[in-house]
Amino acid sequence: MEAHASGPTLLQKWAARASDSEFNALAGAVGGFTSGVVTCPLDVIKTKLQAQGGFAAVQKGRHVGHHKVYEGLIGTARVIWREDGLRGMYRGLGPIIMGYLPTWAVWFTVYNKSKVWMSQHHDNPFVISFWSSIIAGASSTIVTNPIWVIKTRLMSQTGHHSRHSFSHFPKGANTPTSRPTLHSPWHYRSTLDAARKMYSSEGIKSFYSGLTPALLGLTHVAVQFPAYEFLKTKFTGEGMGGAFSSHHGGKNDEHSTQWLGVLSASILSKILASSATYPHEVIRTRLQTQRRPVPGQEYLEGLGGPAGAPQASDGGGSQQPRYKGVVKTFRTILREEGWRAFYAGMGTNMMRAVPAATVTMLTYEYVMRQLKQARYDGRVALGRGVDDLS
């Protein structure tokens, strides 16, 4: 090839020696990063809609349909834009970038490693894909849960319009280790600020709030990725990460058909998984946005909102979290807000999740294709031959 006349590029040299695990980690990280940046505003809107029932004061004797600050995609976007502008639409972008990079890097790496290992013990491709999804999802969830808790809190914090009504306590000592004072329903200025305050006031356990429902959410990837692999194989003849004609001189129309197959498989598999497993996301969001109790402060954000909101009591006068555990959280939401609360923001979630999954998978497949092409070209240029492409 003429491209090799001047020798292999740095990318080709690296790709020629890199393992499939390194390919998957890099492609997954790039895919997750890209989708996170593209869909961040929709993620903020979805989180606001999911979390607002946890902050609203539901007084005794009032019906479930109490006033809501956020209503629908457009209405929520208008409120956020009016209160915080463009910065509000991208609140939490820092932890999204910090989160998606390791999440998808770990996920795709473990998923493909698990598939190789399980294929030695089982022949059914659906079973292999199902359990590989579970293993990969559990690994990435445990590693990155603290980042997602911070992201959810940053995205769901209240705007400036109601901050004055929450100053129930005097300002405390201004030291790095002091418990944060209650200036507003939320008080995090940045990712690092949120991490510091969560650790100093609530301890290490706060970073694993919502871990149980997040692990229950593995049912989502257990539906999505086996469906994706099945559909992509049907549409393109290649499984996930397959290079489809990357170095065999395929025609442009054939490539277009292949990418259309990837797009269709991404959209259909995500819609199926989101529809089947959405309620767990609401439960997880409520648990993540709930502050852990701090002695001496009765009305902390996330523990039921402003003064007058109903709180559970341990009998000794101290307030207990409204949400505790998956089952109790489910019952509390059902009792206070009705079954529709479990699907709060689902329309917005679909509008966010489907493009996010599509961007992730298209980017992942594209990067994998380019890396495999670079590996092929690099090994040819280095004189290792086309037979050394495994």
Image (cartoon, rainbow, N blue to C red):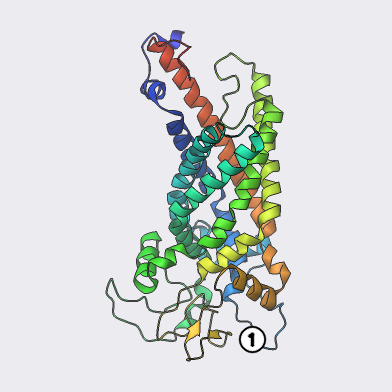
Instruction: Point out residue 40 in the picture as x, y percentages from the top left corner.
Output: 54, 52
Residue occupying the far left of the picture: 175
Camera-side residue of 332 and 188? 332
Could one spot residue 77 in this view of the protein? no
- In this figure, what is the number of numbered marks? 1
At x 46%, y 72%, the residue is 186
Q: Is residue 351 left or right of residue 363?
A: right
* Residue where numbered disc 1 is placed: 59
Compared with residue 74, is residue 256 higher up or lower down, i.e. above or below?
above
Look at 55% across and 56% down and name the residue there.
215
Residue 122 visible in this rendered orientation of the protein:
yes
Q: What kind of residue is marked 1?
A: Gln
Q: Nearer the viewer, residue 279 or 45?
A: 279
Q: Secondary structure at mark 1?
A: loop
Where's residue 131, x and y in %? 59, 43
Neighbours of disc 1 within 10 Å: few (<14), some (14-19), many (20+): few
* Image point (53%, 26%), residue name: 369
Where on the picture, by quarter, is residue 191? bottom left
- Outermost front residue: 121
Q: Position of residue 197 (x, y in %)?
A: 37, 69
- Asked which quadrant contains residue 21, the reply is top left
In the picture shown, does residue 193 fall above or below 20?
Answer: below
Residue 355 shown left or right of residue 207 in the figure: right
What residue is rendered at 60% in x and 47% in y?
221
Provide residue 33's location: percent of width, then percent of height: 48, 44
Residue 201 drawn above or below residue 276: below
